[in-house]
Image (cartoon, rainbow, N blue to C red):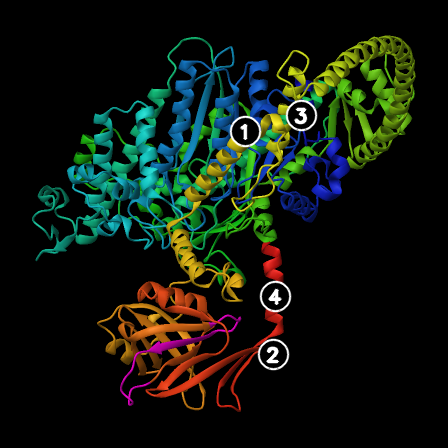
Amino acid sequence: MQGHKAQGAQGQLDMEGALTARDRVGIQDFVLLDTHTSETAFLGNLKKRFSEDLIYTYIGTLLVSVNPYKELDIYSKKQMDIYMGVNFFELPPHIYALADNAYHTMMAEANNHFILISGESGAGKTEASKKILQYYAVSCPSTTLLDSVRDRMLVSNPVLEAFGNAKTLKNDNSSRFGKYMDIQFDIQGDAVGGHILSYLLEKSRVVHQNHGERNFHIFYQLVEGGEEDLLHQLGLESNCQHYSYLVQDECANVTSINDKNDWKTVRNALSVIDFDESDIQHLFGIIASVLHLGNVQFEADSKGYATLNKNTELRWVSTVLSPFTVDHAIYARNALAKAIYGRTFTWLVNKINDSMENKEPSRKTVIGLLDIYGFEVFYVNSFEQFCINYCNEKLQQLFIQLTLKSEQEEYEAEGIGWEPVQFFNNKIICDLVEEKHRGIISVLDEECLRPGEATDFTFLEKLEEKMGSHPHFITHKLSDKKIRKTLDRGDFRLLHYAGEVTYCVVGFIDKNNDMLYRNIKDVNKLLGDSTTDPRPSSLLGLTDILMSKEPWYVRCLKSNESKQPGRFDDVLVRHQVKYLGLMEHLRVRRAGFAYRRRYELFLQRYKPLCPATWPHWRGVAAEGVEVLVQHLGYLPDEYKMGRTKIFIRHPRTLFATEDAFEVCKHKLASRIQAQYKGYRQKGEFRRQKEAATKIETCWRGVQARKEKERRQWAVKVIKKFIKGYMTRGEAKTTDNSEYLAFVRQNYLNRLKDNLPKTVLDKISWLTPPPVLTEASAILRQLHMRVMVTRYVRGITAQQKAQLQLKGITSVIFKDKKDSYPQSVSQPFVDTRISEQDINMKVLQMIRHERIKYSVPVVKYDRNGFKPRPRQLILTQTAAYVVDEAKIKQKVQYTTLKGVSVSTLSDSIIIFHIASEDVKQKGDLVIQCDHLFEVLTKLSVVANKQSAINVVQGSISFQIQAGKEGIVDFSSGQESMVYKDKNGHLMVVRSFVNSRLREAWVCMLV
């Protein structure tokens, strides 16, 4: 089953096979890194894989994950199927591989396991835990009950993120608490329940946030996304700026966070987890009360005691807080807010646990998921960072212990001698923090409990007194001059396994107390028992839980601080590699042998390298491996033979073996391929020859019989066709009926493929045979109707108007004026001059008349025929000749006797105007490039179609009353208009236009 799935993983390489691509994509397991002690080589391999979008790398069974800050197509259902049931090193590193092997190891050994996910904020810890949960949700058996359990596990994430996550400077969705989730499986491997433990909730964030950071998500989700009725019921407004606890950070609204959508997700999740409406109302009521509490303000009375500055705000608080100063009252208010939120978070976790609880008494195994803060080093490190870093110090101690233990157990099981491993033992740092009566925690507790006034600085003095000689503890007082410059008087520095961290003691006493003042304790009792101890001692139970389980590790790294895809910050990654202890873990894994494999798997892969083991080894696998390595020339100190596995000390030995196998594989493939092809070809040739002989015999017989039948049929058809042809002119008889039918069908088939395409095609209709003359005429009429109908239905209103105008133009000019055929294909436009291009004064003068059409023209003076550019404007009642802002001539349509144009291809138009007064202007002579368009528009507007004349020869016109002028027309080498010697206006059109006209006419014909 495993082998089948592995073969189906297209594009994937197994671990050994990927070694041949190590120069390009790096090595998939750092244990196989030849220079394993070099941090530079470690980072180089990590960077090489990151550049190829390979974000996962192994250190043995530890998984290193680098956040790519972009979506990768490696988390689909198909990818899950590839990794299900496959051996850990059989496919490239992936979080699915780790999750699957943890599950199958748990099922095989019937013991408990946990997966520790660590890394700093923004490294992808929360996403990694989600991917593991999603994998188990898909890969485990499915029933209605189990689906319900898995749904609750999955939707618990957005709820806990809303109440326990916040935006920080490094991450918009930073977990501000540690979460340990047990996934419970029954004996069949079904996920049947779950349980969550929370640690180190950063309650101080409720009342204080650093600049650029936000409070917990739920506050903003409630205010921004809450329904109007709910907000009204809780006394809230939909504006974060109105609440003191939400505006300290000055970034209540963040573009990358959609609080309204997240609110809907949380509400849906609460219903899936079986929160009833009453629980939800109470939960959000408490969250709202924290916001209201943050808005409570105090003033000092005459005695200096705190009083409320508004009578409308919680009058009873004055009694509870009296006789506090204002500073003490604010401190008590904040302490109450933190206590309320902390207990609410604990209640929420317990409620989720109740919904996932499996109460069946049957035996169960678990896989735990631990998602906790990574090592934190800020510019100012306070009590929270001290707790977090101590937690990581303990986890590192546990990590090294369990890793050494698993390595030693494997060596002992295989009978290989265990060699002591040199590594940094951080027990000295853990003791410095947790040792009874001497550790920092004990000193802090004593200082909080002793009588008298205890301050942060008296606590620091006690630390200097008790551990002044400790090599991992430094203060301003205890340091030399050089180090003293880097420390303030209120600082102390611890030398952690991951490096130096300087802590500011300000706030240590208050945060360690984490209790309410005096009378507030009475209120506290109303809220229930005290919350979980926020100090590091609360982690001791977590250590016990982890020690009882088998470990798996995921180490998450940030590739850069700016969250840019594809960017690898060497300095930042080097820092994380150091404080996550990855080099330490690699040294432990490489202390003895870099590579180990079961005899069967090693022999199966590399047996082609030795003639004695190829193609089959008949004996015991261990003996076959011994023969193989001897043939390969392994030196005695390069390998050891265990009970079930071979151990190889140096990666270069494995690389040489893999490179030799890669060369051998191609040679073997070629030889096998050649032999197989020869064998197949010989057999195929024999089969084909025999088959060909049989087919030829059968085929010849079949063809001969078919040929005989075809010839007989052909004789009958030819006889009948000849008889039909001979009697085709007679009445229909038995002899000619088929022939006539053939003639009809043949004609109709040819006609179908040669029908006229346009209504203008009058000559391409096929000539019918005599028997189909009448039918052909009917079909021709029907086809013409169809084409006409189709054409009419296809034209638009605009095209229809164009056709109507073109029809008028045709009536006036067709077969009369030479240039008419060229104008047919040119569409008419509504106007040639827009109103914006007509002078405003002219528009004012003709404002009572609607402009129908405008066009630029050239007007020729009546005396001298000098050309002048003008605008011709046609209105409802008159035609105007305009020169910029002046109306040069107005021609009333009632006075327009006629319009004359020549038969040639010129563009001269002559308007004949009725005039009896000598002083009045005479006829109008203009030249227009759009002659057909102008006259067609004029004929429509003025209703003067009959007045437009196409005149052959010269045209006479009235210069003024009683005085006549003549326009002569002719053809020449080039077009021109000029005053001839005889005083006439001479219009010459070139011969080219005449030839074009003849060509156009020929084409139309």
Residue at image location 34% in from the left, 80% down from the top: 882
Q: Residues within 10 Å of mark 4 (few under 14, many from 20)?
A: some
Element type at marker 2?
Answer: loop
Badge 3 is on which residue? 408
* Disc 1 residue type (three-letter): Glu
Residue at image location 24% in from the left, 38% down from the top: 287
Element type at marker 3?
Answer: helix
Residue at image location 28% in from the left, 33% down from the top: 343
What is the x, y in percent for residue 348? Answer: 31, 29
What is the x, y in percent for residue 252? Answer: 31, 50
Range drawn in magenta: 902-921
Closer to the chain start, of discs 3 and 4, is: 3
Observer-side mark, 1 or 4, equals 1
Q: CA distance from mark 1 to mark 3?
A: 107 Å
Badge 4 is on which residue? 996
* Disc 4 residue type (three-letter): Leu
Disc sitting over residue 974 in the figure = 2
Q: CA distance from mark 1 to mark 2?
A: 56 Å
Closer to the chain start, of discs 4 and 2, is: 2
Element type at marker 4?
Answer: helix
What is the x, y in percent for residue 747? Answer: 63, 28
Q: Main secondary structure of the magenta part?
A: loop
Badge 1 is on which residue? 774
Q: Residues within 10 Å of mark 2 (few under 14, many from 20)?
A: few
